[in-house]
Image (cartoon, coloured by chain):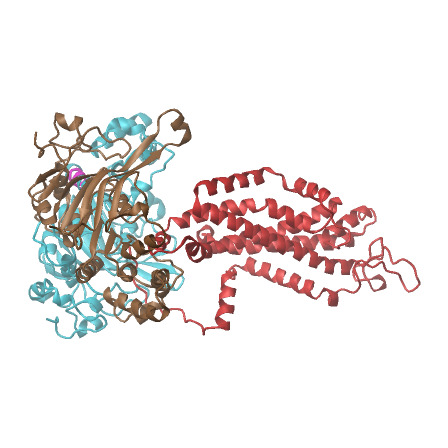
Amino acid sequence: MEPLLSLRDLSIAYDVDGGTVTAVDGATFDVPRGVIVGLVGESGCGKTTLARSLTRVLADNARITGGQAFFDGQDIMALPERQMNALRWRKIAFIPQSAMNSLDPVYTIESQLAEVLCKRGGLTRARAHVRSEELFEMVGLERGRLRDYPHQFSGGMRQRVAIALALALNPKLIVADEPVTALDVIVQRQILDQLRDLQKELSVSVIIVTHDISVVAYVCDQVVVMYAGRVAETGAMRTTLTRPAHPYTMGLRNAFPDLKSAAGVLTPIEGAPPNLMHPPPGCRFAPRCPFAQARCTDSSPPLVQVDGDHLAACHRWQEADVLRPLAALTQTWAIDIGATEMGGAKS
Amino acid sequence: MSSPVTLAKGPQAPRRGILRMVRNAFRSLHLPLDDGFAIAGLVIYAVFVLVALFAPQIATHDPTEILFTATFDLAADRRPGEDGFIMGTTSLGRDVFSQLVYGTQSALLIGITAAVMVALIGSIVGVVAGYFGGWTDTILMRLADIAFGIPFLPFVIVLAAFLEPSIWNVVIAMALILWRDTGRVIRSQVLTLRSRAYVEAARVSGSSDLKIILRHIAPNILPLSFLYGSIAIGWAILTEASISFLGFGDSSTISWGYMLQDAFASQALSKNAFYWFVPPGICIILIVSAGFFISRGYEKILFPKLGR
Amino acid sequence: MTAAPLVSLRNVRLHYPVGGAIAALRGKTTVVKAVDGITFDVAQGESVGLLGESGCGKTSTGRLLLKLDAPTTGTVTFDGADITTLRGADLRRFRTRAQLIFQNPFEALNPRFTIRASLSEPLENAAIPLAERHDRIVAALELVRLPEPDQFLDRHPHQLSGGQLQRIVMARALILDPVFVVADEPVSMLDVSVRAGVLNVFREVRARMGLTAIYISHDLALVRYVCERTIVMYLGRIVEDGPTEDIVREPLHPYTKALVTAVPVPDPDQSHDPLPIGRGAPDPRNPPSGCTFRDRCPQAFARCAVESPGPTRVGNRIVHCHLHAPS
């Protein structure tokens, strides 16, 4: 079956005072129908820019500099604004970061839902009311609270309202930018459970943008790992997390404490992401990679197929099975930033 | 979330001593050199300051001197250019140009003194009220409320009636009343600053209140003080002009307001003597506008997001 | 005989009246009970996590410990002295011995100050002689593993990354050789790959300097990485207090059970068991009577509505729950 969303070589840049920042550089991945995809990476990796670009709600100084994004067969990057507007909310919905803070405090929740349902969806007021109650029930809120104001809800409840708003017109794709980051762990878990249930019930595709691979492991079917504007690795969640092929993914795994297993040592990835105004030639992760070789700084590794739909952008992807156990050791990552190692890790 | 490192070079520390002090003094003025309007304002001020400083050299005559022509006639009502009077003379026989030039002195004197008083008093009140809170805050803000309740111009007139006519009446009145705006706004700014983590960090490090105020709070409110100060200059000059125009000013000092009053009293309009009131009028407009232009520049420094 | 604890809290309450003069006239002042009667000791050299969600009072407790706020009732004792009575020279001395590591490294340093100036401030306050200052600054930076300190000293915060800044914040807290440190969610604003580095430094420094530390966080996994002992808080009260490993392996209090279940892990095969907790958010203005957790507790019974549970010792832990209390 054809994927719902197909990104091919998508590039997005910002014009800033000092020059141009290439926030997303040649992103390529697929989002099948009816799955939850996790878009994971550190700050500055381009995931939020990418997410916003899917509804084409970007900042004034942002430009799509190349590539395509096929949604249901149509390249949404090439659509004229009017047609794109017809897609927004009806086919693709976006939940921005801290959505719970973006509710208008002077209007009731009901009227904000009604605005989406009536103005965008063309429903009558009566039908909108029925639908609003439906939506509230779907996201686990009491119907009686439709008439309340945002400040009367807690943070977690407002996030559910944001999800309800996104679901209002039954879109095929929901893009949620860090939907649970600002929430307490219990509420976070409840919202993630809710998202999973909703996704199964409605067969909607969801892209969750997050920096937390634990969240990805809990709720996502597929994962796309981004680093410095590029896709480092993508594939089924289980495969990618248990048998990563890209050193960055391997390193990320080490940086997350696992509550359920014995206490270990957390290993940081030394250094910081590169300056996207003047990205280094070659692989962007090379300066921080313990397995970097000469060819890594010379040429940028292409996204290759490791196995089935598991893709990775690493020159040494074929050695992944050997590198993985090395990456699990703390000493491997204690490298000297600025020096590129030849021929493998320090041990 | 953290942003990626851009390991640019740090600022080069200038050599210690005089150079550094001058540089710091200049920096502490936070001159708004980005905005075109602000630069225009600064230039206008610079011109007026120079004129005030070199008034004796620039003016052609003594501004208060009643002048006579070579033929011992009163040199009154001369039009611009006649008899060597660049801008003509008043009906009393005084040189308009010289009055204009010397008027710069009193304008700037009042303007700057008043501005400094307003900015200083307002800032101190704002900082003390905002930082210490509690009763201090309540008392100071109620004082500000009282000041808000007093209409400014009538107050100046009443003051002028009690004290002897002098250009300093305006300064006193402004110092007593017009600090209220600055005080309020700076207090809010201090309230925001006070809750910043680095201020709390200073407290945890054991810094005294005075030290926190001087090192952490004051530098952040200075641009705001300067903004209000630069607006206050314009207000002071306008007020002085109004007072003089209404006849409550000091007639022994030549000011632009005095010139306007003189022009009115001498029926400038019916005599078609535009050269009596237009020059001082333009000067007042220029200097007040310059004050606002500069304040725009400070506003950009303080609230850069307003522009977008 | 065990040594006296370094820090001691007894029945500490921090209540904020809310509602203004008109409400007070009508006799309806609501009180926010940020901290509602907590008691615990911290021994010298111990590393204790204060764990809980937002609104539980952990941050308020941290502030009370450092005399940034004063308790409404109850006592906070540091090294035998009641800190609410500290003044003048004694207070200054306290400030050199008890320090705070802030949550947001981007806000904790004055953006106009160079790093050198920020680090000098505590030294100036403690009247450390000029000649010594540079060395102490360099030593502090080396302590937090910032190599080549000279390249940082003349920089400004906006030129540095979050991880570097947080280490500097730590260096500033440690520069006067304190004995007690409160770290308020020190890594929550940092990128994940950077957190590990900062946490490792924290662990190392604590061990090296023998610091007594309180680590405030809502993240159980991080608390477990850093603290031997954990105090779980809910709505201003302590619900469980004991060795971290034990609490994680076998949580006793229903709230702790829910917390442990709720934490996601990087394991694709983790369980998706339903959370053993009711919906609803804790409201510090309107807590339920008796046990404040009872409206969300799956195991609540009659006694819970009537009586607030006191501390019960279970093994090497203390639990505040009627389920474990002697009847």
Between B135 and A183, the residue placed more toward the observer is: B135
Write the residue at 31% across / 32% down.
C31
Between A83 and A307, the residue placed more toward the observer is: A307
Between A78 and B143, the residue placed more toward the observer is: B143
- Which chain has been coloured red in this picture? B
Determine whether C23 is above or below A251 in the image.
above
State left or right for residue B66 relative to residue C62. right
State left or right for residue B142 relative to residue C204. right
Majority SS type along the magenta span: helix
Q: Give percent across and percent down for residue A233.
A: 16, 58
Q: Give percent across and percent down for residue C137.
A: 31, 67
- Which chain has been coloured cyan in this picture? A
Indicate whether residue C113 is drawn in magenta.
Answer: no
Residue A257, by quadrant, is bottom left
Q: Give percent across and percent down for residue C30.
A: 33, 30
Magenta residue span: A192-199
Q: How many marks?
A: 0
Q: Give percent across and percent down for residue A344.
A: 12, 72
Q: Is residue A20 visible?
A: no
In which quadrant of the rendered image does the N terminus of chain B lie? bottom left
The picture's colour for chain C is: brown
Determine whether B292 is above or below C322 in the image.
below
